[in-house]
Image (cartoon, coloured by chain):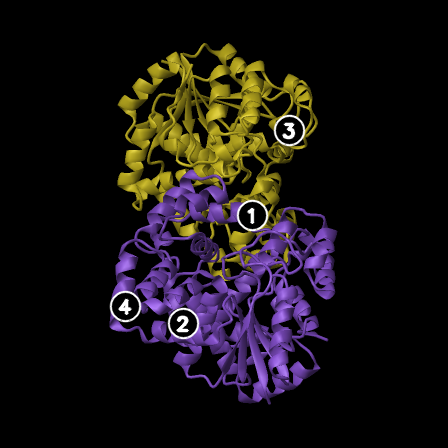
Chain colours: A yellow, B purple
């Protein structure tokens, strides 16, 4: 059986996402497509526009056969851990033969060549990275510059690849396949339409542009052409139910008040806080009155906005360095299935036979596992997921929709 | 020197507050009036309508000569600890000869008789309280019923006194004077005008009615007659600056998200959580989407709304049972002066000579004390105060007004 894996956020599921699926299917007729999807919070440290349940429905309609939740501790992490965690989940599933990803480049050979360098880390390359880091650059910037200096002059243009976020992720997927020794073949699909960060709407709009339009109250009808009909209808339903759009600004007083009650020592223990950043965060928390002001205060050449947003979310959820260290060592401890098609159901059966960690498709089974394992390492990863999901619901526009514990009562979606 | 002490919240300072001062002055011409005032959060577990700095200005204009902040750990407590903490502060000041308080009754003799019973706790009375508590009554209700059963039939009408909140506080002031053996004479002034809980505006409106009108966007001009001119002008200025009115509802997502990230064990350690209440709070936090829903879910015969509001505030600020136990054992560790008149300045000088704990009138002295003592018991009381003040500012309507650390930069107000 040939099964294609995809790693995605689908925030929301748009034409570009559908294009990736269709383009991969054109290369080879797969027996099914599984997707590991970010749940309620996404890599940039923001709340997703609508819940993982709604986004699961969109993806099923868009051609994905089986949706699996990417645990929070992978979903809201830097590119390396995001990609690594997702690939570990895919490896655990034991059913995927291929991995498809979009990239600005589309040139798999080039990406594989770069992936090899950053994996093997030749001595000279390592020294260059260290040098640029001590100059105060962020890790991605230091790495791009180190590669530029390291490569032979003819290859230098490759480095510009690393300025594009999808290429960076693609590189990390390839590295994870390489490092974990997975028998998975990569398929790189060249992205088309708007760039990742483009905020204008177009026929093939980026998810960023769609979110931007929604949060700035653009008339709903004008957003419609940017999404497949089914995606659009699901999103419209969620908005009508007061379950979307989720606006990260609603986290404002929650985050600000959380930080103001924390000591420098407590802030220092938050994951990704290092090198005295706790002092800057502490001072920002006590002098800024808005989330945006806080972000700007903390931001520096070394700490970009994405990293700061993630840190703020870690602070809100109480995610510490030691917690992450333990969870990283342990690896994925469960698979949470969010939805499946008839083809997905067959893959799911195969997964259950092959997977060495528990696979949950029913909420009540997940709940039992949670209650039996909470406080112990295997349950900690889920505990973070449950906490994050419960906090996420608090930010739904409709107060009636804010009850927690949905993970324990929601059955996977089927089409 | 004859100095009158008053314990108040002034939330906001209204005609009734001025009446108390004038009536007491009429009984005896005092050399000055000191007031121990709740800072930013009040006894019911709510944020004050406007900051302690604004309320200090109102009180100075209303005839108070010296304003002292009641530490948070006394201000946001049940009647016994509120009264006890305030009387301990007054005792530390060492300058007050009298204490005046408003009460619905006005009959000092009756109040003193009841205070004696609840202080000496005759065996039979104690048994009656225990009995009513095991029936599931709140402490104030159990006490009122126990007293009713204990008193001889002719005195029974006295017990109805205990249904009035100002009488309850008056009783606790008298008890504290009695227990601490303070050489302070009590003056009971009969309240006039609206009852404490009345929510309609009138010429002598209660603070409750004024807050209610403001938070429900009643046109400002209609509220004006309920306040002395100066109070009204200060309040209007605060509103114009976006520093009022503070609405406790703004604490909503902050409190809900804080509770959803806490374990049952952590909730159990919050001050005033006992007898399995942690389970009810935990469940409420995970099933309710609004603060009001949460309160209603937790409320029971045993736990009234005031107590629940206080618990929610303790949770937000991380105030635990062990923290309070330690602070209670230690007693007040500093005096924070918020403002004074020329007469107050003379009293302040005398206080500084007599007081065995540090008296701070300048923010920078308070800051030095804080930095030298944080993490040790004498600094813990102040640490809670600083944290509470910093959180309070986050709920100001104007983001520019939300910076923390004002306690360290604000000088006392002088008139």
Tell me, yes or no, whether dots 3 and 4 are on the same chain. Answer: no
Residue to which mark 2 is pinned: B328
Q: Chain of mark 3?
A: A
Contact flag, marks 1 and 3 (Cβ < 8 Å): no
Contact flag, marks 1 and 2 (Cβ < 8 Å): no
Of A233 and B18, which appears nearest the observer? B18
Residue to which mark 1 is pinned: B249
Q: Which mark is residue A252?
A: none
Image quadrant in which the N terminus of chain B is located: bottom right
Residue A60, above or below A157 = above
Residue to which mark 3 is pinned: A214
Q: Chain of mark 4?
A: B
Left or right: B41 with respect to B233? left
Left or right: A278 with respect to B408? left
Name the front one of labels 4 and 2.
4
Q: Chain of mark 1?
A: B
Tell me, yes or no, whether dots 1 and 2 are on the same chain. Answer: yes
Residue to which mark 4 is pinned: B126
Of A57 and B3, which appears nearest the observer? B3
Q: Secondary structure at mark 3?
A: helix
Q: State how far apart marks 4 and 1 are (Cα).
A: 39 Å
Q: State how far apart marks 3 and 4 are (Cα).
A: 64 Å
Image coordinates for residue A16, horizontal then vertical, percent = 59, 20
Left or right: B296 with respect to B220? left
**Other-residue count near label 4 (Cα within 10 Å), few / some / many at <14 / 14–19 / ≥20:** some
Q: Can I make out residue A136 in this image?
A: no
Tell me, yes or no, whether dots 1 and 3 are on the same chain. Answer: no
Q: Quadrant of residue A336?
A: top left
Image coordinates for residue B238, horizontal then vertical, percent = 70, 58
């Amino acid at each position: 059986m040939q099964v294609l894996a995809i790693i995605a956020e689908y925030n929301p599921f748009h034409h570009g996402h559908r294009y990736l699926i269709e383009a991969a299917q054109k290369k080879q007729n797969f027996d099914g497509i599984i997707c590991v999807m970010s749940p309620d919070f996404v890599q940039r440290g923001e709340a997703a526009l609508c819940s993982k349940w709604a986004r699961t429905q969109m993806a099923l309609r868009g051609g994905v056969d089986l949706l699996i939740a990417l645990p929070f501790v992978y979903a809201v992490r830097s590119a390396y851990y995001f990609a690594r965690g997702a690939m570990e989940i895919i490896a655990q599933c034991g059913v995927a033969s291929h991995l498809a990803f979009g990239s600005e480049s589309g040139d798999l050979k080039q990406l594989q060549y770069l992936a090899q360098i950053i994996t093997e880390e030749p001595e000279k390359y390592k020294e260059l990275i260290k040098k640029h880091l001590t100059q105060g650059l962020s890790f991605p910037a230091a790495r791009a510059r180190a590669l530029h200096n390291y490569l032979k002059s003819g290859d230098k243009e490759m480095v510009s690849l690393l300025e594009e976020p999808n290429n960076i992720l693609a590189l990390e997927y390839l590295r994870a396949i390489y490092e974990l020794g997975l028998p998975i073949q990569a398929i790189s699909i060249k992205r088309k339409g708007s760039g990742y960060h483009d905020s204008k709407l177009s026929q093939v709009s980026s998810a960023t542009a769609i979110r931007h339009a929604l949060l700035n109250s653009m008339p709903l009808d004008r957003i419609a052409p940017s999404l497949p009909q089914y995606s659009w209808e699901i999103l419209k339903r969620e908005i009508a139910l007061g379950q979307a759009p989720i606006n990260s600004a609603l986290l404002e007083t929650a985050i600000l008040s959380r930080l103001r009650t924390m000591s420098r020592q407590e802030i220092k223990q938050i994951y990704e806080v290092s090198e005295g950043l706790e002092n800057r965060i502490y001072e920002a928390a006590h002098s800024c009155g808005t989330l945006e002001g806080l972000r700007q205060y903390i931001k520096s050449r070394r700490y970009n906005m994405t990293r700061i947003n993630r840190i703020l979310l870690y602070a809100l959820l109480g995610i510490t360095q030691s917690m992450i260290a333990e969870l990283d060592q342990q690896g994925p401890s469960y698979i949470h299935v969010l939805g499946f098609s008839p083809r997905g159901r067959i893959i799911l059966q195969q997964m259950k036979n092959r997977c060495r960690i528990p696979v949950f498709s029913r909420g009540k089974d997940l709940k039992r596992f949670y209650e039996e394992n909470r406080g112990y390492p295997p349950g900690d990863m889920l505990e973070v997921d449950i906490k994050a999901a419960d906090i996420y619901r608090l930010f739904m526009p409709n107060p009636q929709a804010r009850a927690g514990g949905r993970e324990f009562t929601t059955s996977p979606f089927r089409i």
